[in-house]
Image (cartoon, rainbow, N blue to C red):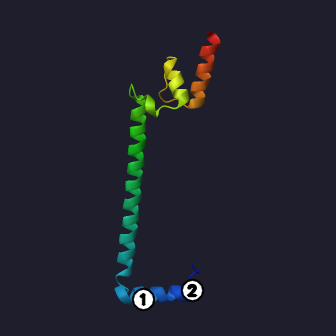
Amino acid sequence: MAMLGTQELLLIFLAIVLLFGATKLPELARSMGRSMGEFKRGQQDIERELQAEKSALVAQPGADIALTRTQGMAKKMGIDIVGKTDDQLLAEIEKKLEKK
């Protein structure tokens, strides 16, 4: 696909002005901005919901399917896994194994 030059862009802009009129352009730009903002808010809401569901799934007893191997091993050893990274869990597993 070829890049649009200045002349093509001016022609497109002129066609838009002729179709919608110069008074409608600011209104169209505002509505497009609102639509984009609403889309981004919706996307952020979905991301928050997914993160909350993921956190709730890990916190539930019997939810071993969603656990990483490190989390599963730490849980079997009786180590609390909530809010800890795999690296932190590995360090605790090593400490527990050294004690034995």
Q: Using the rendered view, name the quadrant where residue 85 is placed.
A: top right
The x, y position of residue 8, in whole percent, is 53, 87
Dot 1, crowdedness within 10 Å: few (<14), some or many (≥20)? few
The x, y position of residue 59, in whole percent, is 41, 29
* Disc 1, SS: helix
**Disc sitting over residue 64 in the figure:** none
Front residue of this view, candidates 50 and 63:
63
Q: Residue furthest front?
A: 65
* Residue type, numbered disc 1: Ala
Residue receiving disc 2: 6
* Residue type, numbered disc 2: Thr
Give the left or right position of residue 1, taking residue 27 as reference. right
Q: Is residue 21 visible?
A: no
Residue receiving disc 1: 15
Picture residue at 38% right of the left edge, 80% below the top: 25
Picture residue at 45% right of the left edge, 34% below the top: 66
Q: Quadrant of the C terminus?
A: top right
Q: Using the rendered view, name the quadrant where residue 53 is placed.
A: top left
Front residue of this view, candidates 74 and 65:
65
Disc 2, disc 1: CB below 8 Å?
no
The x, y position of residue 15, in whole percent, is 42, 88
The x, y position of residue 56, in whole percent, is 39, 34
